[in-house]
Image (tube, grey):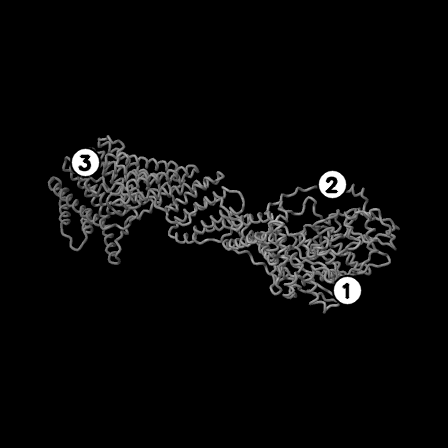
C-alpha cells in the first residue's frame, strides 16, 4: 500500500539552469561491448573534456565556500531562494536518514536565504600554519574539543582513485569526436535564433566589493561549477552548483551516464545520489554502463522516477522530502541573526543534528584579539545583494528590506578600513529615502509592498522590516543624515599608494589595531522578511522533453554596471562618491524647499533653496543655468507669497535666521559658482516693498538664465504678476499721499511714484501679452485705466488738458481690456470687473464734463447744447455697460448705477427744458428717465434716492402746470403731480419701518443704526489680479466734491452715486466700492431723509392749495367743485398739527384719503 501511495503522489521537482559553463546536452557515443576502459582514450590527456565539465570527475575536490561565490554571481537570487549551496552539501543533508557519516557545515543567513558550505575541521582548524582561522580554532578548542572525540570532528573523504580514474576514462570515451562537435556547433549556429540585448538602465556607478574579501578562505581556489541551477524541490527553492555531466542523443535527448561494477550492486546511498543528481538537473533518465574489471558489458536505461524502487537500493522519496523540509525549517527558525556564523554538525553514527551559534559563543576577549573570518565576506555579500536589489524592480516593492541589508552591512564594516563601501552604503540609504528619480515638485513616495499572505509565510517568528518613514520631512531628515555620514567617510580614502603604505606602516606600529566590527552576541541583528513567492511554473517542462533542461541564452549576458573607476583608484572613487552625495543633498534640499513652499513656510523654503545652490557647487559639476533659473524662480515665488502672508513675517524671518547643518566637507571649500544667485535671495524680509523687489530680481535673473522656451513661458506670467503688484503698490502709495493734507511727500516724489507705477504696469502688460494670457492682460489694462484716472484726479501738472487726456487713456485701456476678453463667456468675473470700471469712468467723465468745461473733448465748445449732447453720449455709454439683467454679485450695484444715470439724464433734460428748450421732446425724455430711475430704486427699496427722484418728477409736473395756457391744463398737470405724490406712500411706509428699527437698534446697543430694508451691500471689487496683495482700487473723490444735491431742477444734475441704500454728497469715484461698501447710513443721511420728507409735505401743501383755488374758480363744472372740496379737506388735514406721530405716518394718511377722491 505504501508503494502505491508514493507512486500516486510523486515528489514535485523542477530545475532551471541559471548559468552554464559547458555545452548543452550533447550526443554521447555508446561504447561497444568488451571495450577496455582501463586503456585511456586519445582525448583523456588533453583539455578537451573540460569543455564538458569533466575536470572534476577524477576526484570531487571540495568546492570551498562556494555559496558566497554563487551569491555574488547571482545577487538577484539572494532573498528569493531558500538555500544557496553546492549540490553535494544538499545531498549529504538529505541522506542523513540513510547515512552514518558525519556532517559538518557552516551556515550564514543573508536576508531570507541560507548559505550552506562544507566545513572541514581537519583542513581549517587542525592545520596550525593557517593564522586566518585562529578565531575559529580558539573557539572550537574552548567549547567543543573536550566534548567531542577527534574522530567525530574530522570529516574525511574516502579516496578511490582507481574507480574515479575509470569513470573519467569512461566519460571521455563517451564524448563525441572533435569533428562531430564542429558539425553540431555549425548546425546550432544555423538554427539558433538570437535575441537582441535590452538596453540596461543607467544607474549611478557604485564600487564593487573587493574580490579577495568575498571568500572566507582567500587561499582556496575558485571552484567553477559546470552549471548553476535553481532547483525547486516541493516548496523549497535552492540555488545549487553542480558538476554532473549531461548527455543526450537519438530518442533520449537528456540523460546522465553512470559506470557500474557488475559485481557490486547499487546501495541505497548510491541510488539516492543518482536520483538527487537527476532531479537537481531535471534529467529524466540515467544510462548505466556495466563493466567487469574495466571491460564494458552492457547498458541499461533507468527512468529517474524508478530509481527509488531499484533492487538493493530502495528508499522513500517522501522521507527525503520530509528531511528537506524539516532541516530547512530547523535552520530558518534558529539561524536568524545576520552576520552570525552557525555550525551545523552531526557526529559519526549519531542521529541528532546540532546547530551552534559560534558568534554568540565567543567571549569578549576572543572578539578583541581575533577576528571572525566570515564577518567581512558576509558584509560584502550583504552589500552586493542590497546594491543589486536597490537598482532593480525589487526596490519599489521592498525598500524596507534593502534598508535592513544596508544597515546590517554597516554594522559589520569599519569606515576606516572600507571607506568606499561604507560611503556607498550611506548613499544608497539616502537614495532609498529620497530616490534619484523623484521630482521635488511632485514627490510620490508611496510604498507598494506585496500583499502579505499567511499561507506563504514560512517562519512566523520573522517579522516584516519596518517600512520607510511616511512623511516627506522625516525622509529628507534621514537622507541628509546618511549624506552627512557618507561625507564624513571621505576623509578615510587614501589619496595615493605612498600615503596608503605610510598609513599601513603606522597602523602596524600601533599597539591595538582596529579590526572590523563584529556582531554583538547578545544583540541580534533583525532579519528582514519578504513574502516567499510561489514557484514559477512557467519554466517547467515534461521530463521527456528535449527542452527539459533550460539554459540561459548566450545573448542574455550577466548584468553589468557602467564604466566605473578602477577599484584601486581611490582618488577617482572619492571624487565620484562625493559628487553623488552632494547631488543627493541637492535633491533632498530641493524637495524640502518645495515642501516648505507648498506648506506656506516661505522662510524655510528660501533657506533650502540657498542650500541647494551651495551643495551644487561642491558636486564638481559645471554651472547649470537651468537649475539656477528654476531655483531663483521658486525663490521669487517664496518672496511673493511671503508678502501675501505678511502677518506671519516674524515666523518666516525666524526660519531664515535658523541655520541648517553645513554639509560642506573640509576638502570642498572654495568660492561658490552660484554666489550671484545666492546674493539675490533675501536673508531677512524687512518690508513689503523690499521683499517684492527681491522677488522681482529673482524672477528677472531666472528669466535671463532660462535655457528653454518652456521655462521662459513659465516665468513670464509670474513676472507679469509681480509687475502688476509693484505697479499697484506704487499707485496706491501715490493715491494715499495725495489724499493727506498737508502733503507728506513733495509733488516730485509723488510724480516719481506715478512714473514707477506706470512703468511696472506697462511691463506687466508686455509680459502677459507675450504669453497671450488674456485674463491677466485684461486685468492689467484695467489697472492701467485706474492709474490714468488717478492721474487725472491728482493733476500734479495743474494743466487742465492733462486731466481729459488721462481720462481718454483710461477709457482706451478699459476698452482694450474688453476687446482682449472678446465676450463675457470667456471670463465672467473679469468681464464684469472691467465693465464696471469702464462704466464708472464714463459716468465720472460725464459729470466732470457737465460741470467743468475743460473736461470737454472740445475745449472751444461754447454751445450749451453741444456740451449737453456730449454729456448725454457719455452717460448713455456708461448706461450701456450696466448689466442689470444678468444675475451676478454685481447686479445690485449695476441696478443702482443705472438708476443714478437715469436720474442724471432726467435731471439734464429737465434742466434743459427749463432753461433752453421747452419743447415737449425734452420733457418726455425727462419723464422717461425719471420713470426708469423710479422703477429701479423701488426695486432696490432705496428710500432717500427714491424720494429725491419723485420730488423732481413733482417739480417737473408743477413746471408743466406753470407753462400751461388754460386752467384745465394746469389742473391736469397739478393732478399729475398729485398722482406722483401718491406713489410716495409706499416709500413713506418703508421709512416708517426703518425709523422703528433704528430706534430699536439704539435702545439695544450703541452701534449706529442700520437699515434692514436698504439694498444689499455691493461686494468689493477685486478689479486687479485676483492674486493681488493690495486693493488695486484706492482712487477716491475724483470729482473733489464739486457738486451737492439740489432739489431745484435747475441744479438737479448733481445727483448722488453712493451706496444704493444711501444718499450722500456726490462722489464720482474710480472705486465706487469704497463708498458702496458702507451699509450703515450716517446721521447726515438720516437728516437728509427727514428733510426730503418735509419737502414732500411742503410740495403737497402747495399742490393741494393750487388745486383748490383752480377748482373753485371753475364754477361751471360740478365735478371740479366736488374735487375742490376734497382738495380743501386734504389741505386742511395736512395743515393740522401732528400729536405724538411721525410726519411720514401723517402723510400716508393724507395720501390715502386723496386716493378716495
Quarter of the image for residue 796 reads top left
Give the mark nearest the N terminus, 2 or 1.
1
How crowded is the residue under tag 2: few (<14 C-alpha within 10 Å), some, or many (20+)?
few
Residue designated by label 2: 189
Query: Residue 1017 at x, y = what percent?
Result: 31, 48
Element marked by disc 2: helix
The image shows residue 1149 at horizontal and vertical percentages of 19, 50
Q: Is tag 3's residue or tag 1's residue first in the polypeptide sequence?
A: 1
Q: Say which residue label 3 marks.
A: 914
The location of residue 302, given as percent across then percent down, is 80, 54
Secondary structure of the residue carrying tag 3 is: helix
For discs 2 and 3, the disc positioned in front in the rendered view: 2
Q: Report if residue 333 is visible in the image.
A: no
Q: Say which residue label 1 marks.
A: 100
Mark-to-mark CA distance, 2 and 3? 115 Å
Marks 3 and 1, Cα distance to the nearest angstrom?
136 Å
Q: Secondary structure at mark 1?
A: loop
Left or right of residue 666: residue 103: right
Amino acid at each position: 500500500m505504501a508503494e502505491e501511495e508514493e507512486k500516486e503522489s510523486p515528489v514535485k521537482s523542477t530545475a532551471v539552469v541559471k548559468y552554464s559553463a559547458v555545452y548543452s546536452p550533447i550526443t554521447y557515443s555508446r561504447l561497444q561491448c568488451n571495450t577496455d576502459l582501463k586503456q585511456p582514450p586519445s582525448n583523456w590527456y588533453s583539455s578537451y573534456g573540460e569543455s564538458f565539465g569533466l575536470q572534476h570527475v577524477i576526484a570531487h575536490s571540495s568546492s570551498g565556500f562556494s555559496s558566497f561565490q554563487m551569491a555574488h554571481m547571482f545577487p538577484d537570487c539572494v532573498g528569493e531562494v531558500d538555500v544557496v549551496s553546492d549540490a553535494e552539501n544538499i545531498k549529504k543533508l538529505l541522506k542523513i536518514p540513510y547515512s552514518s557519516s558525519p556532517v559538518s557545515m557552516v551556515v550564514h543567513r543573508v536576508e531570507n536565504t541560507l548559505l550552506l558550505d562544507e566545513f572541514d575541521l581537519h583542513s581549517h582548524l587542525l592545520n596550525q600554519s593557517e593564522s586566518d582561522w585562529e578565531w575559529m580554532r580558539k573557539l572550537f578548542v574552548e567549547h567543543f574539543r573536550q566534548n567531542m572525540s577527534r574522530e567525530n570532528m574530522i570529516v574525511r573523504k574516502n579516496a578511490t582513485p582507481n574507480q574515479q580514474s575509470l569513470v573519467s576514462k569512461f566519460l571521455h570515451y563517451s564524448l563525441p569526436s572533435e569533428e562531430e562537435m564542429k558539425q553540431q556547433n555549425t548546425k546550432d549556429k544555423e538554427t539558433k535564433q538570437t535575441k537582441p540585448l535590452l538596453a540596461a538602465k543607467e544607474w549611478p556607478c557604485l564600487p564593487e566589493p573587493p574580490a579577495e574579501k568575498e571568500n572566507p578562505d582567500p587561499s582556496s581556489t575558485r571552484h567553477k561549477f559546470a552549471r548553476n541551477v535553481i532547483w525547486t524541490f516541493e516548496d523549497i527553492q535552492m540555488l545549487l552548483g553542480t558538476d554532473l555531466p549531461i548527455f543526450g542523443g537519438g530518442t533520449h535527448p537528456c540523460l546522465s551516464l553512470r559506470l557500474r561494477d557488475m559485481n557490486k550492486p547499487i546501495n541505497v546511498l548510491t541510488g539516492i545520489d543518482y536520483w538527487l543528481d537527476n532531479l537537481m538537473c531535471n534529467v529524466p533518465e540515467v544510462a548505466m554502463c556495466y563493466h567487469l574489471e574495466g571491460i564494458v558489458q552492457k547498458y541499461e536505461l533507468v527512468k529517474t522516477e524508478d530509481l527509488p524502487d531499484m533492487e538493493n537500493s530502495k528508499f522513500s522519496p517522501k522521507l527525503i522530502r520530509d528531511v528537506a523540509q524539516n532541516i530547512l525549517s530547523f535552520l530558518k527558525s534558529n539561524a536568524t541573526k545576520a552576520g552570525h556564523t552557525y555550525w551545523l554538525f552531526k557526529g559519526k553514527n549519531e542521529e541528532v543534528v546540532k546547530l551552534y551559534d559560534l558568534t554568540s559563543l565567543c567571549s569578549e576577549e576572543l572578539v578583541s584579539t581575533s577576528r571572525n573570518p566570515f564577518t567581512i565576506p558576509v558584509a560584502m555579500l550583504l552589500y552586493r545583494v542590497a546594491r543589486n536589489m536597490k537598482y532593480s524592480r525589487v526596490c519599489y516593492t521592498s525598500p524596507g528590506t534593502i534598508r535592513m541589508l544596508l544597515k546590517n552591512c554597516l554594522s559589520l564594516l569599519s569606515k576606516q578600513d572600507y571607506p568606499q563601501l561604507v560611503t556607498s552604503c550611506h548613499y544608497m540609504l539616502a537614495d532609498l529615502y529620497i530616490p534619484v528619480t523623484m521630482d521635488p515638485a511632485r514627490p510620490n513616495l508611496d510604498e507598494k509592498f506585496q500583499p502579505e499572505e499567511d499561507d506563504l509565510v514560512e517562519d512566523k517568528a520573522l517579522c516584516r522590516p519596518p517600512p520607510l518613514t511616511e512623511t516627506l520631512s522625516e525622509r529628507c531628515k534621514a537622507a541628509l543624515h546618511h549624506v552627512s555620514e557618507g561625507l564624513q567617510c571621505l576623509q578615510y580614502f587614501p589619496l595615493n599608494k605612498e600615503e596608503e603604505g605610510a598609513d599601513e606602516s603606522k597602523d602596524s606600529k600601533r599597539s591595538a589595531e582596529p579590526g572590523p566590527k563584529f556582531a554583538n552576541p547578545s544583540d541580534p541583528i533583525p532579519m528582514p522578511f519578504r513574502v516567499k513567492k510561489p514557484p514559477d511554473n512557467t519554466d517547467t517542462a515534461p521530463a521527456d522533453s528535449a527542452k527539459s533542461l533550460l539554459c540561459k541564452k548566450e545573448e542574455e549576458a550577466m548584468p553589468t554596471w557602467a564604466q566605473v573607476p578602477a577599484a584601486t583608484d581611490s582618488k577617482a572613487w572619492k571624487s565620484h562618491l562625493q559628487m553623488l552625495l552632494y547631488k543627493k543633498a541637492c535633491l533632498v534640499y530641493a524637495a524640502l524647499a518645495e515642501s516648505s513652499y507648498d506648506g506656506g513656510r516661505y522662510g524655510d523654503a528660501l533657506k533650502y533653496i540657498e542650500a541647494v545652490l551651495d551643495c551644487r557647487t561642491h558636486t564638481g559639476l559645471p554651472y547649470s543655468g537651468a537649475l539656477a533659473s528654476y531655483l531663483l524662480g521658486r525663490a521669487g515665488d517664496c518672496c511673493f507669497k511671503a508678502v501675501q502672508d505678511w502677518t506671519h513675517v516674524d515666523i518666516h524671518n525666524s526660519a531664515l535666521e535658523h541655520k541648517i547643518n553645513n554639509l560642506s566637507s573640509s576638502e570642498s571649500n572654495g568660492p561658490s559658482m552660484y554666489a550671484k544667485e545666492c546674493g539675490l535671495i533675501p536673508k531677512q524680509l524687512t518690508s513689503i516693498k523690499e521683499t517684492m523687489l527681491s522677488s522681482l530680481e529673482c524672477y528677472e535673473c531666472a528669466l535671463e538664465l532660462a535655457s528653454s522656451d518652456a521655462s521662459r513661458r513659465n516665468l513670464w506670467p509670474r513676472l507679469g504678476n509681480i509687475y502688476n503688484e509693484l505697479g499697484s503698490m506704487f499707485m496706491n502709495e501715490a493715491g494715499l499721499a495725495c489724499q493727506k493734507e498737508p502733503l507728506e511727500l513733495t509733488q516730485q516724489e509723488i510724480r516719481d511714484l506715478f512714473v514707477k507705477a506706470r512703468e511696472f504696469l506697462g511691463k506687466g502688460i508686455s509680459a502677459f501679452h507675450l504669453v497671450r494670457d488674456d485674463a491677466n492682460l485684461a486685468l492689467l489694462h484695467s489697472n492701467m485705466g485706474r492709474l490714468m484716472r488717478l492721474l487725472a484726479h491728482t493733476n500734479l501738472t495743474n494743466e487742465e488738458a492733462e486731466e481729459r487726456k488721462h481720462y481718454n487713456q483710461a477709457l482706451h485701456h478699459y476698452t482694450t481690456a474688453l476687446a482682449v476678453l472678446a465676450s463675457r463667456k470667456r471670463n465672467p468675473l473679469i468681464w464684469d470687473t472691467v465693465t464696471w470700471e469702464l462704466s464708472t469712468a464714463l459716468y465720472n467723465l460725464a459729470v466732470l464734463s457737465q460741470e467743468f468745461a475743460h473736461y470737454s473733448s472740445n475745449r472751444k465748445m461754447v454751445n450749451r447744447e453741444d456740451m449737453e449732447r456730449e454729456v448725454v453720449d457719455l452717460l448713455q455709454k456708461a448706461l450701456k455697460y450696466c448689466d442689470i439683467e444678468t444675475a451676478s454679485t454685481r447686479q445690485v450695484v449695476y441696478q443702482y448705477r443705472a438708476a443714478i444715470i437715469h436720474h442724471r439724464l432726467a435731471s439734464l433734460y429737465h434742466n434743459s427744458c427749463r432753461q433752453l428748450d421747452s419743447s415737449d421732446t425734452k420733457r418726455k425724455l425727462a419723464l422717461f428717465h425719471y420713470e426708469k430711475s423710479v422703477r429701479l430704486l423701488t426695486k432696490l427699496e432705496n428710500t432717500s434716492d427714491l424720494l429725491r427722484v419723485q420730488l423732481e418728477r413733482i417739480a417737473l409736473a408743477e413746471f408743466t402746470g406753470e407753462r400751461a395756457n388754460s386752467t384745465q391744463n394746469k389742473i391736469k398737470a397739478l393732478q399729475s403731480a398729485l398722482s406722483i405724490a401718491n406713489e410716495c406712500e409706499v416709500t413713506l411706509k418703508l421709512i416708517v419701518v426703518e425709523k422703528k428699527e433704528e430706534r430699536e437698534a439704539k435702545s439695544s446697543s450703541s452701534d449706529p443704526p442700520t437699515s434692514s430694508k436698504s439694498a444689499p451691500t455691493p461686494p468689493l471689487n477685486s478689479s486687479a489680479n485676483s492674486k493681488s496683495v493690495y486693493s488695486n482700487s484706492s482712487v477716491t473723490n475724483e470729482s473733489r466734491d464739486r457738486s451737492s444735491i439740489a432739489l431745484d431742477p435747475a441744479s438737479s444734475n448733481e445727483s448722488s452715486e453712493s451706496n444704493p441704500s444711501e444718499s450722500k454728497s456726490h462722489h464720482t469715484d474710480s472705486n465706487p466700492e469704497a463708498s458702496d461698501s458702507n451699509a450703515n447710513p450716517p446721521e447726515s443721511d438720516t437728516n437728509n431723509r427727514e428733510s426730503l420728507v418735509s419737502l414732500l409735505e411742503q410740495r403737497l401743501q402747495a399742490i393741494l392749495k393750487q388745486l383748490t383755488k383752480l377748482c373753485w374758480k371753475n364754477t361751471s363744472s360740478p365735478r371740479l367743485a366736488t374735487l375742490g372740496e376734497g382738495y380743501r379737506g386734504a389741505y386742511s388735514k395736512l395743515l393740522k398739527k401732528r400729536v405724538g406721530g411721525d410726519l411720514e405716518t401723517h402723510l400716508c394718511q393724507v395720501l390715502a384719503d386723496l386716493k378716495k377722491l
